[in-house]
Amino acid sequence: MKGKFITVEGPEGAGKTTVIKNIEMDLLRLGYDVLLTREPGGIDIAEKIRHIILNPSHTTMDSRTEALLYAAARRQHLIEKVLPALEDNKVVICDRFIDSSLAYQGYARGLGIDEVWSINQFAIGDMMPDCTLFFDINPAAGLMRIAQNEGREVNRLDLEGNSFHERVYEGYQQLIQRFPERIKVIDASRSIQDVEKQVLAVITGIINDA
């Protein structure tokens, strides 16, 4: 691949979506060719799968069904949008990728990190990010942010209990230990401006790393 593939992860309410929208503008002003996208979604098919997964009324969804749907959306998004952009030498910033499945379904749902990894290897092959930014915030603080943000979409995962979100956070901590060279930790408890400075410094470093 000619471009750079950067993914952004974190617990609910970490603020990553807001920050990377601002980072996209910063990078464009600096002259970089940037594509900002998200998972699940980013393209028509994957957005439809997203609606199925995150619909608050779909409370009976089985954990394995959930994991398989995420992997299916990921595959289509990768083939249709991410890989062509990387071939065009773009900087692709993706709001969530494989680590979300490993933390949410693998660890928090109890399916097993290695088992969910296997599902996703079938979906993405050996296509892994050049760098992953983990927005680190206490799960309770993240959920409080969501409660205070009246304009934010409330999805099925937001409705899970605190214990689920604590397990998600624990899952991410395991992934940070497993992939320390790829996953960079961002202190998301700080102000938006401070977080943006952290993120911009890391991303420009990755882009310019020969």
Image (spheres, helix red, strand yellow):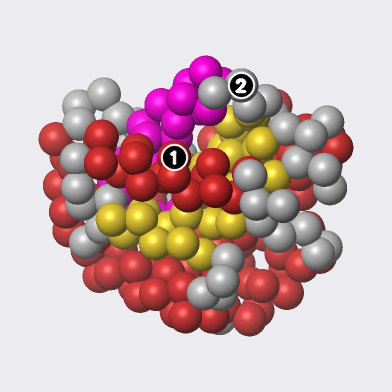
Range of residues picked out in magenta = 9-29
- Residue at 77% in and 67% down: 121
- Residue at 20% in and 51% down: 189
Left or right: 33, with 196 as reference point: right
User: Of the numbered discs in the image, which one, if any, rests on residue 51?
Assistant: none
Left or right: 140, with 118 as reference point: left
Residue type marked 2 = Gly
Q: Nearer the viewer, residue 58 or 69?
A: 69
Q: Please say whether residue 142 is one of the residues in the magenta stretch.
A: no
> What is the count of numbered marks?
2
Q: Please say whether residue 23 is one of the residues in the magenta stretch.
A: yes
Task: Give the mark, 1 or 2, whose residue is nearer the N terminus.
Answer: 2
Q: CA distance from mark 1 to mark 2?
A: 14 Å
Above or below: residue 124 compared with residue 175:
above
Above or below: residue 145 compared with residue 108:
above
Q: Nearer the viewer, residue 132 or 173?
A: 132
Where disc 2 sits, the SS reads: loop
Above or below: residue 161 compared with residue 15:
below
Residue type marked 1 = Leu
Q: Quadrant of residue 118?
A: bottom right
**Label 2 belongs to which residue?**
31
Left or right: 160, with 208 as reference point: left
**Label 1 belongs to which residue?**
200
Residue 69 image offset from top left, x and y in percent: 65, 52
Residue 15 image offset from top left, x and y in percent: 31, 41
Q: Nearer the viewer, residue 189 or 141?
A: 189
Labels 1 & 2 near each other (Cβ < 8 A): no
Disc 2 crowd, CA 10 A, few/some/many (<14, 14-19, 20+) = few
Residue 12 image offset from top left, x and y in percent: 33, 50
- Residue at 17% in and 58% down: 140
